[in-house]
Image (tube, rainbow, N blue to C red):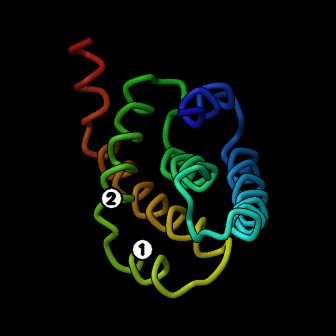
């Protein structure tokens, strides 16, 4: 997935600038997913992956993006939330139409993932894993 190298490439960005990147990917993703669904006659086609990119970037927005451990854990956290679709992610997925629904459920999973990542960071989990590696 392109999202992990993108997060790594932006590791030196201040948080506010990285959040602008997340916003830009989200807005472009909404437009692209909407157009793709129109052209292909689908809704949330598996060929569209910018929604996962936006959600993953949201997950790692508030943690150290200069650590491969953190980026890898963020990927697992995001994918788990994207698959499980806890509230309100499932509601957004089922009720928000068009490109917004395609992308915003993933961004919602990413926001929940960001909270999980902050909790893991505060608990010392990332430092413990870094000592193992």
Q: Is residue 46 left or right of residue 103?
A: left
Name the residue: 74% across, 48% down: 21
Name the residue: 26% across, 37% down: 124
Q: Quadrant of residue 34?
A: bottom right
Q: Earlier in the sequence, mark 2 or mark 1?
A: 2
For the C terminus, which image quadrant? Answer: top left
Q: Of all residues shown, which one is farthest toward the bottom?
A: 95
Nearest the eye: 129 or 86? 86
Q: Position of residue 89 (x, y in %)?
A: 42, 74
Q: Quadrant of residue 127?
A: top left
Q: Of all residues shown, which one is farthest toward the top?
A: 133
Q: Position of residue 132 (x, y in %)?
A: 21, 14
Q: With respect to residue 125, does 59 lie above or below?
A: below
Residue density around tag 1, few if under 14, some if 14–19, many if 20 or more, within 10 Å: many
Nearest the eye: 15 or 39? 39
The residue indicated by pointer 2 is: 83
Q: With respect to residue 91, does 21 lie above or below?
A: above
Name the residue: 64% across, 32% down: 6
Q: With respect to residue 18, does 69 lie above or below?
A: above
Question: How many labels were placed on the picture?
Answer: 2
Disc 2 secondary structure class: helix
Residue density around tag 2, few if under 14, some if 14–19, many if 20 or more, within 10 Å: few
Q: Position of residue 45 (x, y in %)?
A: 56, 59
Q: Is residue 119 left or right of residue 10?
A: left
Name the residue: 30% across, 45% down: 120
Q: Position of residue 72 (x, y in %)?
A: 39, 31
Depth-wise, is mark 2 or mark 1 nearer the camera? 2
Q: Is residue 74 left or right of residue 56?
A: left
The residue indicated by pointer 1 is: 89
Nearest the eye: 43 or 64? 43
Disc 1 secondary structure class: helix
Q: Which mark is residue 34?
A: none
């Amino acid at each position: 997935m392109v999202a992990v190298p993108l997060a790594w490439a932006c590791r030196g960005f201040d948080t506010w600038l990285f959040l602008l990147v997340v916003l830009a990917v989200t807005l472009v993703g909404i437009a692209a997913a909407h157009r793709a669904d129109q052209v292909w006659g689908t809704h949330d086609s598996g060929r569209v992956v910018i929604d996962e990119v936006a959600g993953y970037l949201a997950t790692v927005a508030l943690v150290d993006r200069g650590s491969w451990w953190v980026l890898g854990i963020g990927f697992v956290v995001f994918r788990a939330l994207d698959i499980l679709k806890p509230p309100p992610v499932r509601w957004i997925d089922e009720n928000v139409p068009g490109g917004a629904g395609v992308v915003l459920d993933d961004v919602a999973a990413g926001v929940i993932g960001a909270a999980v990542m902050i909790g893991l960071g505060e608990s010392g989990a990332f430092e413990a894993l870094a000592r193992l590696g």
